[in-house]
Image (cartoon, grey):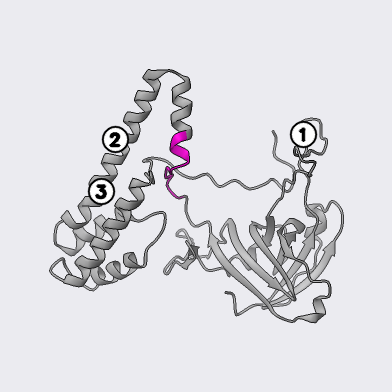
Amino acid sequence: VLTHLQVKMGKRLEGRVTLEQLKALAAAPRGTALVVICDDIPGLDAMGRETFDPRGAQRIMTDGAGLVSISLAKQFPAVSNGRVVSGALRDFGTNEKVAPLVTQLRAWVQGSLAKGTVTACPLLADGIIVLRRSMLKIDAIDPGLSDFSRIEICGTSERASKVRLNASFVPLLMAGAKRQGDKAAQQMYKIFEELQDEEVKRIRSLTGAPSDGQGLKQALERLKGGKLLSSHERAGAMLHAGFTLQEPRLREELNFIQADHLARLRRANIPVPNSYVLLGIPDQSGTLEE
């Protein structure tokens, strides 16, 4: 929660709002985050016509996607899986803090509640957050009824995570392979089996690693990713302090981590090597070519 910021409700802009209009917004006072509400950008087809789903609801291109000024985004802590990532400076060797490209947040603003993602935008003046109407889950009829305002950071785009299969994704891949014939299905099954066997080896290496601290640290680091357990933090702190497998508490934490990873593996939660999750955001300027 960003307790150092005073959050205020700003303008409500109607109709199609361009980036030029947003660029003209005045900067917020120092130490203040000014929230601006504006309409969503509808999804268009190849002919430039607005599109609708089978139920007649309008498709929205900016559904849940807002903007935030660079200066304000730089104040957001690095957050992964709901936890603040300590030591993440985001300076990339430049000695200057860099804003996260995308931030997932919740915002309570004078009785209104919004959630979604905001993309860092260099065109916005200092201290501005632009929320789309699709992000508003509760819209206060009278903002003056409440002065409670908070911004909670749920996650920031610090680095691309590895792709992990799951119980829904695996059957889809198998179904696609079966359409190509039995040989393709057998090849896909073999790939899954090899990935699973390789992950079992990595998991087993946690308690079968060299008893020295460095070997354990490397084994623990290889298993990080996806859901971060509190046991990871406790085991990491103990290793940093110099404990080895001779310490019963450390071995207990490592056994718990190992059991959790094996349980997830049985649910087809299998990491895919040399892969990254691609983060997609809408082109709110409309300038990118098809």
The secondary structure that dominates the magenta segment is: loop
Please, is residue 106 above or below residue 2 in the view? above
- Quarter occupied by residue 85: bottom left
Inter-mark Cα distance, 2 to 3:
13 Å
Q: Earlier in the sequence, mark 2 or mark 3?
A: 2
Tell whether 21 sits left or right of 94.
right
Amino acid found under the numbered disc labelled 2:
Glu
**Looking at numbered disc 1 in the image, what kind of residue is underneath it?**
Asp
Disc 1 secondary structure class: loop
Residue pointed to by mark 2: 194
Q: Label 1, on which residue? A: 45
Question: As displayed, is residue 85 above or below residue 15?
Answer: below
- Mark 1 Cα-neighbour bin, 10 Å: few <14, some 14–19, many ≥20: few
From the image, tell me which residue sits under label 3. Answer: 202
Q: Secondary structure at mark 2?
A: helix
The residue sitting at 23% across, 45% down in the picture is 201
